[in-house]
């Protein structure tokens, strides 16, 4: 049986049917040849998915991408990426976080997008290093020469060290949470230059869902 993954077909699938389709199809299936990941993204509403379904869906996409299908998260439009993250519940995000490989894949993608969405015009001559501690994962953002470079791990001394949960970080990075509010509610902890850390996200174009 040939699977139909056109825009119209995906729109008619229930969340369970979409997940099942992605789980059963082979990465080299001709049906995937012309499938745009944003078509899949527009068919995803985490609020209609169960606690573990969101992670299952992302895992299915990851498996297809690893197998050579053109469905990597990096190809997803920023607004679609922001929408599915913003609509995911805390329980759904925690289910993603509980899968080490999936957690790293999602965090890697979010930090990669920070390089892309950096606003050099807002940074001016700023030179600074910020370390993000998200569970046991550590990422380093280096701002210099009107560019933002992201590293995994630590290579330089930080102006500020930011610690928060994956769920809160994902909300922050997709414009669905405010750094000052997270700080005031104890969900975001900062060592070092608090003022700079509070305004750090303003150096980026935060995608809107």
Image (cartoon, rainbow, N blue to C red):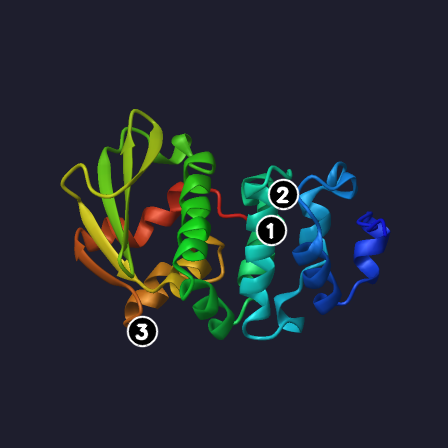
Q: Are marks 2 and 1 in contact (CB under 8 Å)?
A: yes
The number of discs equals: 3
Neighbour tally class for label 1: few under 14, some 14-19, many 20 plus, Cα within 10 Å = many
Farthest top residue?
A: 145
In front: label 2 or label 3: 2
- Looking at marks 2 and 3 on the same chain, the residue that comes earlier in the sequence is marked by 2
Query: What residue is at 42 percent from the left and 57 percent from the top?
Result: 103
**Residue plotted at (46% across, 45% down):** 109
Mark 2 → mark 3, Cα distance in angstroms: 37 Å
Residue depicted at 18% across the width and 51% down the height: 193
Where in the figure is residue 158, as x and y percent of width and height? 17, 44
Left or right: 78 as drawn, with respect to 28: left
Closer-to-camera residue (22/91):
22
Q: Give the label on residue 185, or none.
A: 3
Which element carries disc 2, helix, strand or loop?
A: loop
Query: Quarter-wise, where is residue 194 in the image?
Result: bottom left
Q: Quick one: label 3, few (<14), some, or many (20+) residues within 10 Å?
A: few
Q: Quadrant where the C terminus lies?
A: bottom right
Task: Say which mark, if any, is on residue 61.
Answer: 1
Looking at the image, residue 149 sits to the left or right of residue 62; the answer is left
- Give coordinates of residue 122: x percent, y percent: 38, 36
**In the picture shown, does residue 206 fall above or below 85?**
above
The numbered mark, 2 or 1, whose residue comes first in the sequence reads 1
Q: Element at badge 3?
A: loop
Query: On the picture, is 138 further left or further right than 24?
Result: left
| Nearer to us: label 1 or label 3 | 1
Where is residue 112? Give x, y as percent. Answer: 43, 40
State the residue in front, 109 or 17: 17
Up-down relation of residue 193 to residue 188 (above or below): above
Residue 96 is tagged as: none
Up the image or down, 102 lies above or below 165; here it is above
Q: Which residue is mark 2?
A: 71
């Amino acid at each position: 049986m040939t699977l139909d993954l056109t825009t119209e077909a995906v729109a008619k699938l229930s969340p369970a049917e979409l997940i099942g389709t992605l789980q059963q199809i082979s990465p080299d299936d001709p049906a995937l040849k012309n499938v745009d990941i944003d078509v899949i993204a527009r068919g995803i509403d985490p609020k209609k998915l169960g606690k573990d379904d969101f992670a299952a869906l992302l895992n299915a996409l990851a498996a297809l991408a690893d197998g050579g299908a053109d469905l990597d998260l990096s190809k997803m439009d920023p607004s679609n990426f922001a929408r599915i993250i913003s609509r995911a519940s805390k329980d759904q995000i925690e289910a993603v976080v509980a899968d080490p490989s999936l957690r790293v894949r999602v965090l890697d993608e979010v930090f990669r997008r920070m390089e892309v969405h950096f606003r050099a015009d807002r940074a001016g001559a700023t030179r600074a290093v910020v370390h993000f501690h998200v569970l046991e994962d550590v990422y380093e953002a280096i701002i210099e020469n009107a560019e933002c470079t992201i590293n995994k791990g630590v290579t330089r001394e930080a102006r500020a060290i930011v610690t928060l949960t994956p769920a809160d970080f994902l909300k922050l990075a997709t414009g669905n949470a405010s750094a000052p509010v997270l700080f005031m509610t104890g969900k975001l902890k900062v060592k070092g230059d608090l003022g700079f850390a509070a305004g750090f996200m303003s150096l980026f174009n935060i995608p809107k869902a």
